[in-house]
Image (tube, coloured by chain):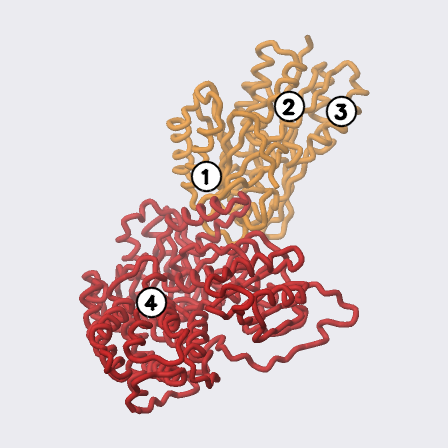
Amino acid sequence: MSKFAIIGDSTCDLTDELRKEYDIDYCRMMVSWTNKEGVNKEIYASLSWEEISHKDYFDLVASGIRVFTTQVTEQEFDKVFEKHLKAGEDLLYIGCSSALSASVLLGQKLQKKYQDKYPDRKIYILDPLNSCMGQGSMLLLASEMRKDGKSIEEIYNYIDEHKLEWHQLATVENLDTLKRAGRVKASKAFFGNLFGVKPILISDAKGNNYAIEKQKGRRNALLRMVEMAKAEAVNPENQICWISDAECKKEDLELLVDNLKSVVKFKDVKVVPMGPIIGATTGKGTIGVFFRGEKVTIIGE
Amino acid sequence: MVLNKINGQDFKNLITFGAKNLRLNFKEVDDLNVFPVPDGDTGTNMCHTIEGGVDNIRGIESNNLSDIAKPLSSGALLGARGNSGVILSQIIRGICKGLSNKKEVTALELVEAYKLGVKQAYGAVVTPVEGTILTVFREATEHVSKMVKKSSSINDFYQYHFEEAKRSLARTIDILPVLKEAGVIDSGGAGYVYIVEGMLKYLNEEEIKVDESSLTQRVNSGEQETKQIDFSAFGPDDVLQFGYCTEFILRLQNSKVDIEHFDIDNVINILNGDDIKGDSIVALVDDSVLKVHVHTMNPGIVLDKMRQFGEFLTIKIENMALQHNENIGDSQLEENRRKEHKKYTVVAVGQGEGIVNAFKELGVDVVISGGQTMNPSTENFINAFKSLDAENIIVFPNNSNIFMAASQAAKLYKGANVEIVKTKSIAECYSALTMLDFSSDDLTIILGNFREVIDNVTSGEVTTATRDTNINGIDIKKGDYITLIDGDLVSANKDRDQSILKALENNKDIEDKQVLLLIYGENVNEGEVEELITKINDLFPYLEVGAIPGNQAIYDYYFSLE
């Protein structure tokens, strides 16, 4: 059995430590904005945060500056994929949900090019219909299965078959960024002048972020997420619940983590910083909870 | 003059004098307000109500009592505003029922009619509260029932009725604790006493001078102005799209139907039939008079089919493509008429440019102008309902004094299912609207969600005191800023911000609240709002505070705490 690489992208929220520990590589997307002085800035959507700190980035988003995001480019795929292919490794790429980014679609398109160039290599492109730690924890699972000696086919088939079991429950602090970016599905009446209203966003069966309901007040939204997690999680005592965090208030984060532990009784609850791509559309204060349950069947209107 | 009997014209004159005397004194009735806030409106509401009846009988010259009673009753019913107004309309309706088959009545017969008034008024109120107009009218009627003999004149009747009404009114202060604390008598009862006093003045041949201009200031008076119809709106090549607004009054005929057991649902079923496909249906039957309003593509079928019940008194059919004025007095309603069919629609009561705009942004289909200082009438609600092409109409009255007029309209309107969400304030309504969500497509869930939101809202109001008083142990000086929370006066202070901050600090639920929305009035500028928000943030760092302009009068702030 040949060695194979597991590859994510900028939306998978895996920190340097996690990627190192689980031996996971990633393809970078791009973010760009025009600062207050009118200067354009374009940088890699890096999960190492070399050019701008996590906090400074989300303060920038919160300041009202519109940050534009770019999918993984062909050059980036060439660079990352070929590095592994040249080294004789097969590839499993689990990218950002195809409903949110065209990266997976481009990867599928380029598959033939790489296959022709490296006919002996196996290349698997998986659309997780999820992002953030939904996508991230699939990558972690793939790595664990690899460690357990599973083949690349087995891993691909298992995750592809079960991917709708990954649940997302997220909320945002402020609707402005979400409205500006227009990346969330919701009925028109959902937004509007909704002071104090907090939507709860799920990743639906087509991989869209869908505002499934709304709550009045931040704390109510967080507690409602706990309630929903309790109803949805399957065997919480045997799984780690992941949280992607975009510079939330400390007390909000604590409230959520404590309740997920005490009420839902997850084996553990771990927090990672949310990446720059999804964060650019949902804004500072976004918080997402990811765990496994029954298959998601809801499709946003 | 001494009358031993009254006929139609006598009764018309009596009621007209009653209405005039109330108009002369309505401001005093308005001022009988439990809270020292400048928004009392009971007198105004009762004036609108009784004048709605008087307008409807002005031109009727018949001496027959029954010819006066019916239009008087239906005019008052549609003109009813405010809770006291609705109760007054029901009193009039009951009395008129007692007079409806009579040419003239003696004082003894009049007693029986008034007893029907008591029965009707108490029956119309879900939980009758004593110490109000209900008590005053009931006790005054019980008194005439005891005092009036076969030999009594009509003058005796009204003299007894008036004297007991006054005594009963004086007692209201001891019955209702809120009145006692505020040191005022019941305003609705006072309004009623002025009406009876006016009736007595007619019998005593006294004059009542009313400034006629004050009578014409009313919104939506029954009189229709000469219409300016623009015929060009429907040209030779236009296709009939909106159908005809068809209205008629029909006299039920004994030869055709059993009038006493006539079931209005027969009419509605026909209008809903496949050949007529009626819309915005309003059907009323009052004894032998059937009044119908319906929008249809086929008015001819309506007319043909309705003749099975009787013969027409009047008919009006108008092409709805024309910019006619259907006595609605609001061009926005005309616009709605052309809107698409909707399963769920929302009607809310509000005043102030900012509030109206915010409501519309949040999905309200029709905003009925009105509020604490001007309660909309039953007819205003019906006109708003008629302007919508809807299966369900959800109504937010936004003031407890508007509940009854809204409920009365909901009962009368047959064109859609009307549900009333009993919002007591603009702030409650705003909060409910931000959570508006019809996606469940289940009325029970939709209404349940609204109620859940409203239960969680604490709503407040800030205004200035109009007199020195003491309420809830709080000493209030005229001109103080007073803050009311959920209808209770909780703080008073010379400084507006301090009044609000104190009210918030003393609120026992403040720790559980997460969101505070301020709706600021026309007397507050943005700088002042910013300052207040800073002060609130300092005191309650975990509260998310926001503000929108409401431009409302009288109240500097409405606020909601959730």
Q: Is residue B431 depicted above or below A1 in this figure?
A: below
Q: Which mark is residue B85?
A: none
Q: Is residue B297 depicted above or below B196 in this figure?
A: above
Q: CA distance from mark 1 to mark 2?
A: 28 Å
Label 3: element kind: helix
Q: Which mark is residue A248?
A: 1
Residue located beneath label 3 in the image: A111
Mark 4 in CB contact with mark 1 (< 8 angstroms): no
What color was chain B assigned in the picture? red
| Picture quadrant of residue B230 | bottom right
Looking at this view, name the residue that lies furthest to the top: A1
Mark in the foreground, 3 or 2: 3
Both marks 4 and 1 on one chain = no
Q: Earlier in the sequence, mark 3 or mark 1?
A: 3
Q: In orange, which chain?
A: A
Subunit bearing disc 1 = A
Q: Which mark is residue B463?
A: 4
Label 1: element kind: loop
